[in-house]
Every structure is written in C-alpha cells, then in structure tokens.
Image (cartoon, rainbow, N blue to C red):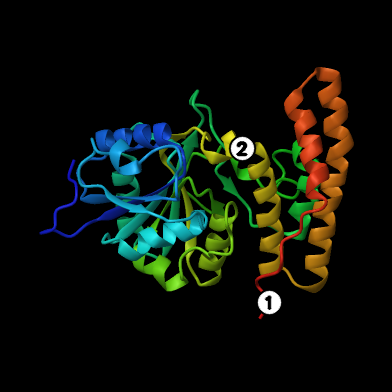
C-alpha cells in the first residue's frame, strides 16, 4: 500500500462526503486503507457541517487525510466538486462513506481504466451486507421507464429491457458491460474528464447527481462501464436511512429536476404527470397493505406520498 507522497505523482484521489455518519466513515476509511495496495492514492474527506462531533478529532487516528469542514451543507454534488478542486490524482474516485472495501478494488479499477484508455466512468459491483447482489446499474430516465416504474410494471416484468430500467441487474451480468448509469456509491473516472464536464451539477442537492453526470458524460462522447470483476459492500446506512422523509422528499425533487433539465415539452409534461400519478397510486396501496400487514414503514410511505403531492421544485434550469 502506498499513500500520498509529495515527491511522487498520485494515481487516485479518493473523495468521501460525510454528514453525521462518523461510525460509517471510520469503518469505510479503515477498510480502504487495509485493502488498497500497490497504488499511490490520497484521501479527501469533505464534511457537510456535521453536528454530531468534530470530524478532525474523530479522524485523528488516520494519517495524511485532507479534511475540508464546510460551514453549511450545500449538497452531495457540491461537496464532491470541492474535492475535485483540490485533488491531485490522475483519477478521482467518488466513494460513499457507507461502503466497505473487501479486496483491492481501487487498484483493479485503476488497471482496467489504464488498459482501455478511453474517456470512461467506471462502477464496480456493489454487494449488500449479506453479500447478495445490489442494484447498481440502471438505464437513463425516459418517459417509458418513468411510466413502468410508477405503475409497478418493473416488478411484473423484472428481466424486460422494455419494462424495467434495472433489467441488466436482474440478468446478473458478470462481465464488463457498457451501461447508462452506475450508482454514485462508487464512481471512478479521470479527474480531467470530470473537470471538463464541469463536475456534478450543484443544483441537484441529493440524489440523481450521478444520473445527470453519466447522462452528460455519454452525451459528450464518453462511455460508462459496469466492472463486476471486483466488488465492495454498500450498506445504504447514511443520512437517508436516519431521515426517511428527507430521502423520499429529495428523491422526488431530484427526479423532477432531472425532467426539468433534460426533458422538453411533451416528454416533460408526460414525465411529470406520470410521476405524480405514481404518488397518488401509492397512497391507498401502501396504506392498505401496511394496515393489513401491520407494517408501519408502508403506512409512513403512504403519508409521505401524500405530502409529496404538494412538493414541486422551482425550475433552476431555465435559460
């Protein structure tokens, strides 16, 4: 394992964003340092004004971390862009703090990128805590998959490309494949390519940042790769898990923002209409099933779906 050395070049800058998830962050950093070998890397931690502790005190056992403490929380994409601005590596890896490395994944992905030598965003295989396969690849949003997602057709036809934007994961692809989007839990690319693209769009506060980034990257001529030759564990245990309303609200807002930015005229109207129809459908369905099964989480989701009917983000993408 080789860490940052000012006299040498740096292969990879690993950027982690944290908000009140210090236990997860410490476990992530420990696994990263344990398993990352034979590569020169640096670690940059951006803290989005955590209130549960002092990040520099909590991380004082780790050497050579570059820590940025933000005075406020401007979102996941904004913080990652801050990391890119100070990164020194040829590549950047955007890594969620709720991930655990179990092998020398960064080196494997670095080698793959060096070998293909083309503009690429790369995501590795993600596993749940029990080592089962986790959804980490999906198609770009379209009017069709907005419809099939909101009307539950993806559940009826899980392996259909026509009905399910996650069809590739249901096929359990185990070879390197060009895809539309890889999830932002592990997103690897050349730093200069990310900078040329302008980084993440800061107007996406939480969720869909990687979808927008991959969409613009592909539009600019790049390729997005799913590289399942190596895997990490993704716990899905950060801010969203602690505050479910925060998660539901921002998922809905970021989805509409993607429509606002990339869909036009009829496609935009159909996508937004379908999105809200999906919310309306979920109110009685989740309430009924939750009541019958005594599932409080489903009842809560019914209430959240009702609340989201009155949430619509201002269009910040108008020229």
Query: Residue visible at 85% across and 58% down?
Result: 273
- Disc 1 marks which residue? 318
Query: Residue visible at 80% across and 40% down?
Result: 152
Question: 100 and 222: which one is in front?
Answer: 100
Q: Is residue 12 visible?
A: yes
Residue sitting farthest toward the left: 7
Quarter of the picture holding the C terminus: bottom right
Marker disc for residue 115: none
Quarter of the picture holding the N terminus: top left
Mark in front: 2 vs 1: 2
Dot 1 crowding, Cα within 10 Å, few <14, some 14–19, many 20+: few
- The secondary structure type at the circle numbered 1 is loop
Question: 14 and 103: which one is in front?
Answer: 14
How far across and how far down the image is residue 297, in percent? 73, 28
Give the mark nearest the N terminus, 2 or 1.
2
- Disc 2 marks which residue? 243
How far across and how far down the image is residue 160, in percent? 72, 44
How far across and how far down the image is residue 109, in percent? 35, 48
How far across and how far down the image is residue 189, in percent? 39, 58
Query: Residue visible at 65% across and 50% down?
Result: 250
Q: Is residue 8 left or right of residue 290?
A: left
Q: Is residue 227 left or right of residue 115?
A: right
Dot 2 crowding, Cα within 10 Å, few <14, some 14–19, many 20+: few
């Amino acid at each position: 394992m080789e860490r940052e050395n000012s006299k040498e070049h740096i292969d990879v800058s690993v950027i982690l964003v944290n908000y009140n998830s210090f236990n997860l962050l410490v476990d992530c950093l420990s696994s990263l340092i344990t398993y990352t070998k034979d590569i020169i890397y640096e670690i940059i931690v951006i803290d989005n004004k955590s209130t549960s502790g002092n990040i520099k005190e909590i991380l004082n056992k780790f050497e050579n971390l570059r820590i940025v403490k933000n005075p406020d929380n401007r979102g996941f994409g904004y913080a990652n862009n801050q990391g890119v601005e100070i990164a020194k590596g040829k590549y950047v890896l955007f890594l969620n703090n709720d991930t655990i490395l179990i092998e020398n994944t960064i080196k494997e992905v670095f080698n793959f990128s060096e070998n293909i030598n083309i503009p690429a965003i790369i995501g590795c295989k993600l596993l749940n805590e029990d080592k089962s396969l986790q959804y980490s690849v999906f198609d770009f949003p379209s009017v069709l998959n907005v419809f099939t997602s909101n009307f539950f057709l993806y559940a009826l036809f899980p392996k259909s490309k026509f009905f399910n934007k996650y069809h590739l994961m249901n096929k359990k692809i185990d070879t390197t494949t060009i895809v539309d989007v890889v999830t932002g839990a592990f997103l690897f690319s050349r730093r200069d390519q990310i900078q040329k693209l302008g980084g993440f769009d800061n107007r996406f506060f939480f969720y869909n940042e990687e979808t927008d980034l991959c969409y613009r990257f592909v539009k600019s001529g790049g390729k997005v790769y799913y590289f399942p030759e190596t895997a990490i564990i993704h716990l899905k245990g950060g801010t969203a898990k602690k505050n479910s309303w925060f998660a539901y609200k921002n998922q809905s807002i970021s989805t509409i923002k993607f429509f606002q930015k990339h869909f036009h005229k009829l496609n935009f109207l159909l996508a937004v209409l379908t999105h809200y129809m999906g919310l309306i459908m979920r109110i009685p369905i989740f309430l009924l099933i939750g009541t019958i099964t005594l599932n409080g989480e489903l009842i809560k989701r019914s209430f959240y779906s009702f609340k989201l009917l009155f949430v619509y983000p201002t269009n910040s993408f108008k020229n």
